[in-house]
Amino acid sequence: MIRLSLVFSTIWFTLFSCASNPTTGYSSSSLYAKQYKSVAIPIFQNNTMNRNLEFMLTDAVVKEVQTRTPYQIIGEQYADSILIGTIKSVDLNVLSNSRTTKLVNEMLIKVVIDFEWQNLQTGRRIVGRDNFSSSALFIPSQPSSEPIEMGQFAVTQQLASDIVDQMQATW
């Protein structure tokens, strides 16, 4: 009898604890809009003097979309939607200096972008953000001697993750 009630309560909990609509409670449905099946992601524009950052960011966004969303990455002529973006600024900030040498110990790289995800059938904006930023820390001093590319890689990975987070359905 105890076993039967345990099985019944488990089934009841599984069937009725999750809502089909995420706005009414926990849900097992996808967080991404179901009306879109594909997205085109052209190379981000770069309005800064930092070379190759647009390629790093585009590659990171494509990989994030492929791994975390149900959307297929295809060419613009076949896609349901398009994700476009522009890198507006890249700033380097010194966080700390060595007490003995006065050389930089830690630096913060901050990247500011604008991006927009559009429905290609209607031309309507699905999601878009202006002055969307992220930052990452890197250590250019000894013994780490990390090059600036380490900071660029970290910040583009974080931006890509944040962009895909924004693509989730709004509640």
Image (cartoon, rainbow, N blue to C red):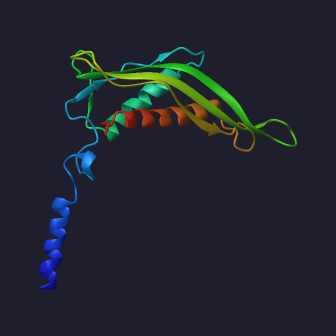
In which quadrant of the rendered image does the N terminus lie? bottom left
Looking at the picture, how far across and down is residue 118, in whole percent? Answer: 31, 21
The residue drawn where x is 66% and y is 37% is: 146
Looking at the picture, how far across and down is residue 28, in whole percent? Answer: 23, 51
Toward the viewer: 67 or 128?
128
In which quadrant of the rendered image does the C terminus lie? top left
The residue drawn where x is 81% and y is 35% is: 103
Eyeballing the image, is 138 above or below 86? Answer: below
Eyeballing the image, is 115 above or below 4? Answer: above
Residue 92 location, quadrant: top right
Eyeballing the image, is 38 above or below 50? Answer: below
- Residue 107 appears left or right of 10: right
The residue drawn where x is 25% and y is 43% is: 30
Q: In the current view of this chain or complex, which residue is farthest to the bottom?
A: 1
Looking at the picture, how far across and down is residue 119, in whole percent? Answer: 26, 21
- Residue 34 appears left or right of 151: left
The residue drawn where x is 37% and y is 30% is: 62
Toward the viewer: 21 or 128?
21
Toward the viewer: 79 or 12?
12
Toward the viewer: 170 or 72?
170
Looking at the picture, how far across and down is residue 114, in whole percent? Answer: 46, 21
Tell how many labels: 0
- Residue 99 appears left or right of 21: right
